[in-house]
Each structure stands twice: as structure tokens, then as C-alpha cells.
Amino acid sequence: MITKNEIKRIKSLQNKKDRKELQLFVAEGEKTVRDLLKSGWIAESIYVTESFGNAEEKLISSKEMERISSLKSSSSVLGVFRIPIQQSFSHEGRILALDGVTDPGNLGTIIRLCDWFGIATLICSLDTVDCYNPKVVQATMGSLSQVNCVYTDLVSFLKNTDKPIYGTLLAGSSVYDEPLDSEGILLLGSESHGLSEEVKAYIKHAITIPRFGSEEGAESLNVAIAAAIVLGQAFRT
């Protein structure tokens, strides 16, 4: 049995303002919840429709799970986790930086890519979608706990770094020809506007993913697809 107050509180966590105020977020799906727990993230509560072996789990009905889930088809496990305190981050190795990425699915996929390629730090501009948005958390499939997502003033960060900065633009050197420094920062812009003019001013190396198809085809690539291509090429050099 789940109370009305619990339902109201959980559903409120779909809103960024409430997540920030309560310092909580929701994760759905057995794999995602298990991975977060395995990584040491603290669950305030775990709701299940059938036991999955956690001592703190609370058994509820499928109908109750549907009421608290943000998914079209609710999972059998939902966890309410504490948002970890943002720690200082290492400046070593490659860093991926996002400028105004607003689509939750794209951010979630990019976090998974960072996990896959061993990118420990993901720098996000302040207008990038919240990484604790339920759709982002769902899309990460548990990788959220493996990547340090840092929200900061991106211009200030770029201004104060001595690392080489690579920016993805429509005009630039082919990503297949430009060696990408193992200590570099890879910049990706929003789905609709690309990199802002303020951010472009700090690019030291402009790179592009060349088009091989017809000029009458797609105008641009999805930012998550672009990230996959650039990261895949980065680790070949």
C-alpha cells in the first residue's frame, strides 16, 4: 500500500524545481535501480510489484505503480534516490562538454556514450536539460552513476582551461582527418541551434562530420549520433 502523500511526492519529482528543492530523483527499471545501488547511490525508498531482493523495498500493486510511474508502460521497480552532492572533478583525460542540449533522450544517450568510452566528466551548460530528469535517467540505463555530470557556466569553464578545445561545426576539418588530443575538450551544441557564439569564441580546433550523401538529404545529425561518431573517432587517434 502506498499513501496519497507518497504518490504526490513522487510525481512532483518529475519537475526540476521540486527535484532541486527535495534533492531527490526517480529511477525506474530493475537494471537502472540495481546499477545505482551497486554504485553506492542512496535510495530513500524503493517500490516494487514483485520482490527483487532489497531489504528496503516496499511491495505495491501494479495499479499503484502505474500511478507513480512516468513511463507509458510502468516497470516492476521504481526507486527514489538522493541527488549526490556535486563534487570537484578531475581535469585529466578527454572531457565532453554540452552547450544547450535540451532533449532528455539525447542527454541520456550521451551519458551512456561517456560511460562506454570511459569519459569520466561531462560538462553541461546551465541551460542543458537536468540529468536527473526522469526521461534522462531512463535513457542512461544505469550509466548515470558512472559519469560525473557537472553543471556550470560553460563560457567561464572554457575561458579558464588550458586544454585544447575542439568544437563541432558545419564547417571545419573532417573529424576523420583531425587528430583529437587525448587531453582535449570536445564541444557539442544543441539540437536546433548548435554551439552558441559565446562558446564558439573559445574553439581552437573546428571539426565537422563530413556528409557523404546527397546535399538534398538531412540538414544535420542528431547530437547523440554526432557524439557517438566523434567519440568513436577520438579513440582511434
Image (cartoon, rainbow, N blue to C red):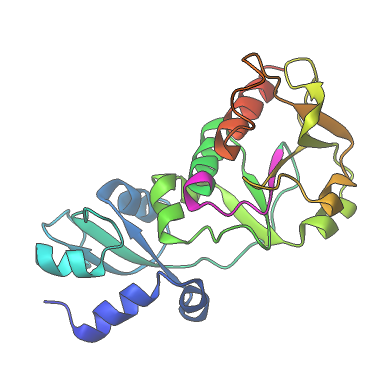
- Name the quarter where the C terminus is drawn: top right
Is 187 inside the magenta-drawn segment?
no
43 vs 217, nearest the viewer: 217
Q: Is residue 99 left or right of residue 31?
A: right
User: What's drawn in magenta, residue-wise?
Assistant: 95-106
147 vs 20, nearest the viewer: 20
Q: Can residue 156 be seen in this view?
A: yes
Q: Quadrant of residue 233?
A: top right
Is 104 inside the magenta-drawn segment?
yes
- Name the quarter where the N terminus is drawn: bottom left
On screen, residue 199 above or below 179: below
Residue 191: x and y in percent read: 62, 45
On screen, residue 47 above or below 205: below
Q: Is residue 96 left or right of residue 130?
A: right
Residue 198: x and y in percent read: 85, 54
- Residue at the spot 21% in from the left edge and 56% down from the top edge: 74
